[in-house]
Image (cartoon, rainbow, N blue to C red):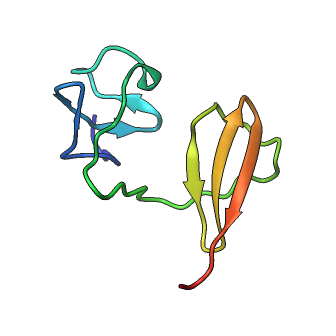
């Protein structure tokens, strides 16, 4: 799979390469079966803003924009955390 958004990290002993919410062929089970070990940094490459608190999403999805971090807490149910300079 090309255009990976998570690379160079190890998940359950295998390299992780995710794009459009799917793993590459070397990992045959879903994301929810794994815990991602990304050291001290996790980078989400592209910003995305849910259109509302009921926008499409699955529990555990995380996205961001310049003002908020968004977390989907259950199917189609988003919460957000405001960002500020520190």
Residue at horizontal 41 percent and vertical 19 percent from the top? 33
Horizontal relation, residue 53 to residue 64: left or right: right
* Front-most of residues 51 and 67: 67
Total numbered circles: 0
Residue 78 is drawn in which quadrant?
top right
Q: Residue furthest front?
A: 86
**x then y, percent, for residue 26:** 21, 21
Quarter placement of the N terminus: top left
Residue at horizontal 74 percent and vertical 50 percent from the top? 79
Residue at horizontal 17 percent and vertical 26 percent from the top? 13
Q: Residue furthest bottom?
A: 85
Q: Residue furthest top?
A: 28
* Front-most of residues 2 and 67: 67
Residue 40 is drawn in which quadrant?
bottom left
Horizontal relation, residue 14 to residue 33: left or right: left
Residue 47 is drawn in which quadrant?
bottom right
**x then y, percent, for residue 75:** 72, 29
Horizontal relation, residue 69 to residue 21: left or right: right
Residue at horizontal 36 percent and vertical 54 percent from the top? 42
Vertical position of residue 38 compared to residue 45: above or below:
above
**x then y, percent, for residue 28:** 31, 14
* Front-most of residues 54 and 34: 34
Vertical position of residue 83 compared to residue 80: above or below:
below
Horizontal relation, residue 82 to residue 34: left or right: right
**x then y, percent, for residue 53:** 81, 47
């Amino acid at each position: 799979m090309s255009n990976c958004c998570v690379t160079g990290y190890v998940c359950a002993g295998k390299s992780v390469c995710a794009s459009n919410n799917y793993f590459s062929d070397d990992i045959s089970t879903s994301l929810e079966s794994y815990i991602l070990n990304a050291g001290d940094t996790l980078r989400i490459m592209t910003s995305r803003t849910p259109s509302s608190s009921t926008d499409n999403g699955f529990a555990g999805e995380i996205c961001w924009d310049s003002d908020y971090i968004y977390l989907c807490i259950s199917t189609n149910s988003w919460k957000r955390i405001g960002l500020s300079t520190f």
